[in-house]
Image (cartoon, grey):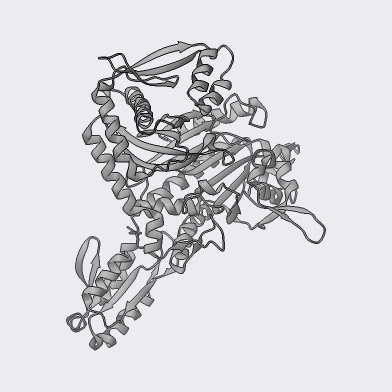
Amino acid sequence: MVSSSSDVEKMRHTLSHVLAAAVRELYPTTTFGVGPAIENGFYYDIDFGDVKVSDADLARIEKKMRGIIARKCKMVRREVSREDAMKWAQENGQKYKVELIEELPEGETISFYDLVDPKTDEVLFSDLCKGPHVENLEEIGAFKLMRVAGAYWRGDEKREMLTRIYGVAFETEGELEEYLKRQEEAKRRDHRKLGKELDLFCFSDLVGAGLPLFTPRGTVLREELSELSLGMRGRAGFKKVWTPHITKVDLYKKSGHYAKFGEELFMVHSQVNGEEFALKPMNCPHHAQIFASRPRTYKEMPVRYMEATTDYRDEKTGELGGLSRVRSLTQDDSHVFCRKDQIKSEIQTLVGIVRRLYATVGMDKLKARLSYRDSSDKYLGDPELWKMAQEQIKQAAIDNGLDYFEQEGEAAFYGPKIDFMAEDALGREHQVATVQLDFVQPERFGLEFVNEKGEKERPVMIHHATLGSIERFMSVFIEHTGGWFPLWCAPEQVRVLTVNDKVEGYVDEVEKVLRGVVLEEPVRGNELRYEVDRSDDSLGKKIKRATEMKIPVVLIVGEKDAAESVVSVRTRDGEEKVKLDELKGWLMEKSRK
């Protein structure tokens, strides 16, 4: 049995080979792409030709896999020459393997793994692979095939569409069962499902893929979250700015974004003079232009701008999914222009904002990924500045007591980052807020201020997003809460249910109290959002509707309640009676939790 994380990965990688062997037995004409181990499991990309394989075929494939495992086969590694590897691929009609072999560097060791039956020495399956794998299939723990999906070869939508079969694997049956339970809960919490059930957002083919439309209820939720972020940053000294949604392409050429992300731009051409514009994909170059619009001195530094604005990116259709990845994304974007000796305090302020916001939304288990550059040439700027910036990022993480880890190759092209990872109710990690140092754009745009010596000095630019893409954060937040939003941001906070028409006069008194409630925390100055269900339906049906819409507070008003000047309150925590003259205070207190 496997016993460590590396052993688990070996098991999962081995299972991708067992999957391929089972598929080869059932579908002899298939050709194979790649089959790696992934988080929680494995997959294999397979070309089935004209044969259509769906989720309905997984049980049959899994049964064949278990039969292979029962034979206690061994995984045997062998090294071959480039010529022999190519001969094998060509003779077996494995065109994808031919392509992989052709791309291997000269002199690199080429290895195969054979799945061998120890009783007969029969080779059940051979595959080009670097490994590693378990030595014997007896070491494989619990697994299950999960789903079939489409996947372009090499991730290129201009290439062949292959069939990807996903599986999950764990050391024990208990771990597998726990994972499957979490997956079922994840399906119930799927933001696309809840978005429809709770009437939060929709999509239209006439509008276009990846362009969500928010209903009145969904708009309340996104604006409450945005106001939470804006309010916290506003109290930390950030000032609102506004920038247009289109800009000359020259701006992004100057900033360096065009060379890196030109393919993601939506292009707009002027019909008047043919000038080329783009829908803005990010906001930092615009904010840099505001900073550069007049002379600056050290006395006004740092300069802090914030904006909640929609950007546009031409994402591939196959990568779009609900609100998780869209073409129109609203960012709660911030940029700080500061002196080098202010970097530490500014990062400390931003870390504090992140911690407060995620504590407020109930996702306070935060880790920090320190995202550094690697040795590739995809980064701009002086390597010595990068070294200094990465040291400052790490020191900031230490000074702020962050639970952090370091990762090369994840930096922005202009500087290193602190990327915050939040854990949701199902234990899944999501990248959320970010703090990024940038020495490149101030240089490219020639930004400057006059220091205390009367000399011109280059500022440092700090990029920050607290929620990031509001759409993406909403997808995470909807699933984290399961649609049971905290009172302060719920689209409908209170619903009043009447037992019969005889209580109408008392309902007017209840409404008067509700209209006087103005919630101050965590988003300030919000009048209470409530509705009254006066329908002729039974109380049971009214309660069912309110529960299905996940209304945080339900007030039931009957004749006895009217006589006693109370309301019957239903929440997820239970039921209680609240005096009418105490209802306002009760709701104010509830909003703070």
Q: Position of residue 414 (x, y in %)?
A: 63, 36
Q: Quadrant of the N terminus?
A: top left
Residue drawn 25% across and 22% down?
A: 71
In the rendered image, the vertical position of residue 10 relative to residue 319, given as above or below: above
Residue 249 visible within the image: yes
Q: How many numbered marks does the figure carry?
A: 0
Q: Position of residue 21 (x, y in %)?
A: 36, 27
Residue drawn 43% across and 63% down?
A: 200
Q: Position of residue 29 (x, y in %)?
A: 44, 31
Q: Residue furthest right?
A: 273
Q: Is residue 530 left or right of residue 34?
A: left
In the rendered image, the vertical position of residue 450 relative to residue 220, given as above or below: above
Q: Quadrant of the C terminus?
A: bottom left
Q: Is residue 252 left or right of residue 118?
A: right
Q: Quadrant of residue 297?
A: top right
Q: Quadrant of residue 171?
A: top left
Question: In the depicted view, which residue is nearer to us: 451 or 59?
Answer: 59
In the rendered image, the vertical position of residue 512 relative to residue 358, given as above or below: below
Question: In the depicted view, which residue is nearer to us: 255 or 464?
Answer: 255
